[in-house]
Image (cartoon, coloured by chain):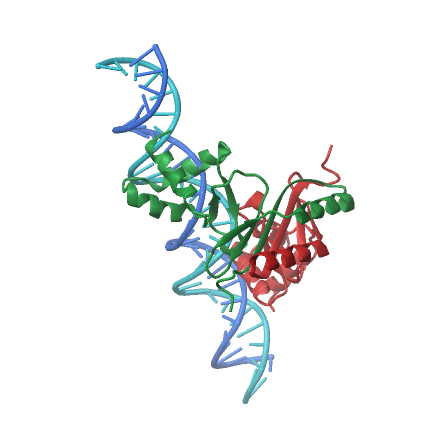
Chain colours: A green, B red, C blue, D cyan
Amino acid sequence: MTIQRRLILETLESMSSHPSAGDLYSIVNQRDPGIHLSTIYRTLRWLEGEGLISSRWFEEERRQERFDPAIPVDHHHFLCTHCKRVIEFDYPLVDEIIQQFERDSEARIESTAVVLYGLCKNCRG
Amino acid sequence: MTIQRRLILETLESMSSHPSAGDLYSIVNQRDPGIHLSTIYRTLRWLEGEGLISSRWFEEERRQERFDPAIPVDHHHFLCTHCKRVIEFDYPLVDEIIQQFERDSEARIESTAVVLYGLCKNCRG
DNA sequence: CTCGTTATTGCAAATCATTCGCAGTAAAGG
DNA sequence: CCTTTACTGCGAATGATTTGCAATAACGAG
């Protein structure tokens, strides 16, 4: 555990917005101006491999990977298309979809990505 | 409507696999060896704008956009992680998730991306 | 059918997020 | 304090997609 890794992990954990590597860089950079973007990437990749964080791709911002400080246990996401806020949820209904699909198709489901896009409470209206 | 555009659209419509631009290029290229990859991209973008096709990003192959010959009406996807086959489905359960989330969060949902990953009937076992 | 205008193509270079190779530096344990 | 091993900073590479531009094809008017 190096200073940089600790700083990156702490910063990510303090954010609920599922930042991209670049977002994280501009914040971490304020406390450690010498840090390099590639260190951010490598550390995020390492944290992911250790199972401490997980990563997401949202269709809205298809190009940028976003990082989630949560352990990669199944949960799902809402992304506000206006303020970019992320809300997590976990409904048993998703499991019902999996079961129905497995019955209908005889496939075996191993993971899911359920994302809802729209306007949050604050951005409606 | 040029020769190239017609060829690209016909080719996409004949495929159920949700090909990437590169996949499409290697097939279209057999019938029109002079065609350029940028024409594929531009045409796909144009078809998308016309509402004739839609595009998807799957987390499994995060880097590559895949194109769907279907009109962009709400439907959902299964991607076989082994053979890359895509199966489409449309369950009312997804609408129930939307309604439940809208109730819980007071957000307004405008679109969804529901993708299931796993092994299809043929690739299990 | 021919000409002129406008849209589309082919090509090459640019983008942009992410990754990689490498040499220098820091961590960790003895 | 020293040695080994892992991590960082840096710059260059990657790879899918986009863009600028000059050449070409489509389409409508005559």
Q: Please state if A84 lies on the left or on the right of B114 as rendered.
A: left
Is any part of residue B56 visible from this angle?
yes
Q: Position of residue B34 (x, y in %)?
A: 56, 56
The quarter of the picture where the N terminus of chain A appears is top left
- Residue occupying image coordinates x 73% and y 46%: A101
Q: Vertically, is D20 above or below D10?
A: below
Towards the viewer: A17 or C15:
A17
Q: Position of residue B97 (x, y in %)?
A: 65, 54
Q: Please state if D1 lies on the left or on the right of A6 as rendered.
A: left
- Residue occupying image coordinates x 75% and y 40%: B121
Towards the viewer: A86 or A42:
A86
In the figure, residue B105 lies in which quadrant? bottom right
Tally the marks. Answer: 0
Q: Position of residue B42 (x, y in %)?
A: 53, 61
- Residue occupying image coordinates x 52% and y 61%: A121
Q: Position of residue A69 (x, y in %)?
A: 47, 41
Q: Vertically, is B117 above or below B109?
A: above
Q: Vertically, is B70 above or below A5?
A: below
Is any part of residue B90 visible from this angle?
no
Towards the viewer: A40 or A54:
A54
Outermost residue toward the front in this view:
B104
Q: Please state if B35 lies on the left or on the right of B89 as rendered.
A: left
